[in-house]
Image: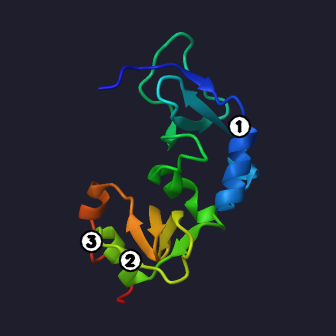
Amino acid sequence: MRAAAFFIPLPEPEALLAWLDATYGLPADLFAGHRFWLRTDSGTLWLTDAGTVPPPGVRLDAFGLLAFRDAPPRGRPTNTFALRFGAHATKSVLELGVAASRALLAGEPVAVADATETGWRIVRGPGQVLGMGWVAEGQLRSELPRSWRLDVDPATGWPDA
């Protein structure tokens, strides 16, 4: 188990906001009223309300919403971050139909003809964000936690394929 650590405000949040806009079409004003924090021992990035600050001198395990496990451009948004903000994304998004969404949630790769570049995508199914996926060689691979995949319910309200 990882020991608790200190959190500091992200030193250059403007660079991260510019990257989110350029990569996912998530404008900086979407994060107004929020603040990004860097966990000092792991380099993970966390997001909180702007007025939230960690208690001085206290080591924490978590602080807000885990946004990135590694800082961009190497890192990618976490699935939780994608669920929270992915509906606003205008770039690097894949919209899936019912059958493809069910296949992805079952852990199966999904062929995507319009995704020619390798990389991370925010994946949206009918009416909702599913999370993050990896596209390579015309196939989308799920990066969803296994527990999310196992909880697939055919009666999700999605219309039949």
Across and down, in percent, residue 143 comes to 39, 59
Q: Against 44, is 4 above or below?
A: above
Amino acid type, callout 3: Asp
Mark 1 neighbour density, 10 Å: few (under 14) some (14–19) many (20 or more): some
| Mark 1 or 2, closer to the camera | 2
Question: In the picture, which quadrant includes the C terminus?
Answer: bottom left
Across and down, in percent, residue 26 comes to 68, 57
Across and down, in percent, residue 148 comes to 31, 59
Q: Which mark is residue 154?
A: none
Residue that sits furthest to the left in the current view: 150
| Mark 3 or 1, closer to the camera | 1
Dot 2 lies on which element? strand
Residue that badge 3 annotates: 153
Q: Earlier in the sequence, mark 1 or mark 2?
A: 1
Seen at 49% across and 13% down, the residue is 58
Seen at 34% across and 25% down, the residue is 2
Seen at 50% across and 84% down, the residue is 113
Q: Are marks 1 and 2 in contact (CB under 8 Å)?
A: no
Q: Does residue 25 appear to the left or right of 47 in the view shown?
A: right
Mark 3 neighbour density, 10 Å: few (under 14) some (14–19) many (20 or more): few
Examine the image and state in which quarter residue 9 appears.
top right
Along the viewing direction, whichever of 53 and 74 lies nearer the viewer: 74
Question: For the residues marked 1 and 2, what is the alpha-carbon distance in whole angstroms?
Answer: 35 Å
Examine the image and state in which quarter residue 33 appears.
top right
Across and down, in percent, residue 36 comes to 63, 36
Amino acid type, callout 2: Val
Residue that badge 1 annotates: 13
Q: Are marks 2 and 3 in contact (CB under 8 Å)?
A: no
Q: Earlier in the sequence, mark 2 or mark 3?
A: 2
